[in-house]
Amino acid sequence: MTARLVVMGGGRMGEALVSGLVRAGWAPPGDLTVVEKREDRRRQLEERLPGAVIVEAAPAGAGAVVAVKPGDVEEACRELAAAGVAQVLSIAAGVRLAALEGWLGDGVRVVRAMPNTPALVGQGAGAISAGATAGPEDLDWAEGLLSAVGTVARVPESLLDAVTGLSGSGPAYVFLVAEALIDAGVLAGLARDTSAALVVQTLLGSARMLAESGEGPEALRAAVTSPGGTTAAGLAALEERAVRGAFLAAVQAATERSRQLGA
């Protein structure tokens, strides 16, 4: 029997993708096969993904997702090639299309993706790039898969390092901001749990405003900033400490590091 989709790797991202596909109605659980080498993890997945097929070795499949650690990608690709899969989406960080295509062999259409960790809660932001023989229908297929766990952009592979530096590493930047704001609230006299609750909701609410208001961040920031007011004073302190420049430098540094690791 041929699986509609084979997911190589039953880690957190593989599990999140299968859960998202079922939740979105992309396929019933029985059409989704997860290949996981660890027996203890297979038992967990059988409980967490009821109805999905959990196996140790790749079966024949119409398409496949490579969701293993970078060091295991070659083995996973060669296993998929032996199983006769013709269409592959790789979400393995840092593994270039040329390497994927070499391991998978001729006749396999490959799309490479860079998702981020909020995909684990269905709110990811990522990008996809087509391999040498992948066409628009393959990009549509890959976007349909990743849309189950977030937002997807299409970029040439040369820009995936920038995607890594921005949205791939971006959650860590946001978490650092959250840590700093919570500490600032404590310094100002709030109990830590109160400060944490206020910061988390502030971040959630601000993100919702960005996504739903139809206004850009500049306009929304200006609307909160009264002349000579408290927000203006806070923003002035941030600008004095070059916080904007620090974020620019962080994304550039992460992008360059992604290039180095990929090389």
Image: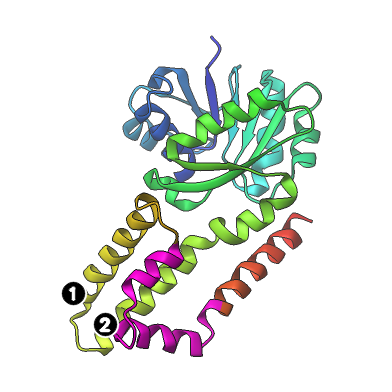
Badge number at residue 194: 1
Q: Residues within 10 Å of mark 2 (few under 14, many from 20)?
A: some
Taking the image as shown, residue 51 lies to the left or right of residue 12, namely left
Magenta stretch encompasses residue 240:
yes
Farthest-out residue, top: 1
Q: Which residues are magenta?
A: 217-244
Q: Name the quadrant containing residue 127.
A: top right
Taking the image as shown, residue 241 lies to the left or right of residue 16, namely right
The colour scheme is rainbow
Disc on the earlier residue, 2 or 1: 2
Q: Which residue is mark 2?
A: 185
Farthest-out residue, front: 227
Badge number at residue 112: none
Q: Name the quadrant containing residue 62.
A: top right
Taking the image as shown, residue 128 lies to the left or right of residue 186, namely right
- How far across and how far down the image is residue 41, in percent? 43, 39
- Residue at 54% across, 36% down: 37
Amino acid type for the residue under numbered disc 2? Gly
In the image, residue 9 sits, relative to residue 261, either above or below, namely above
Mark 1 residue element: helix
- Residue at 38% across, 33% down: 19
Question: Mark 2 touching mark 1, by CB under 8 A?
Answer: yes
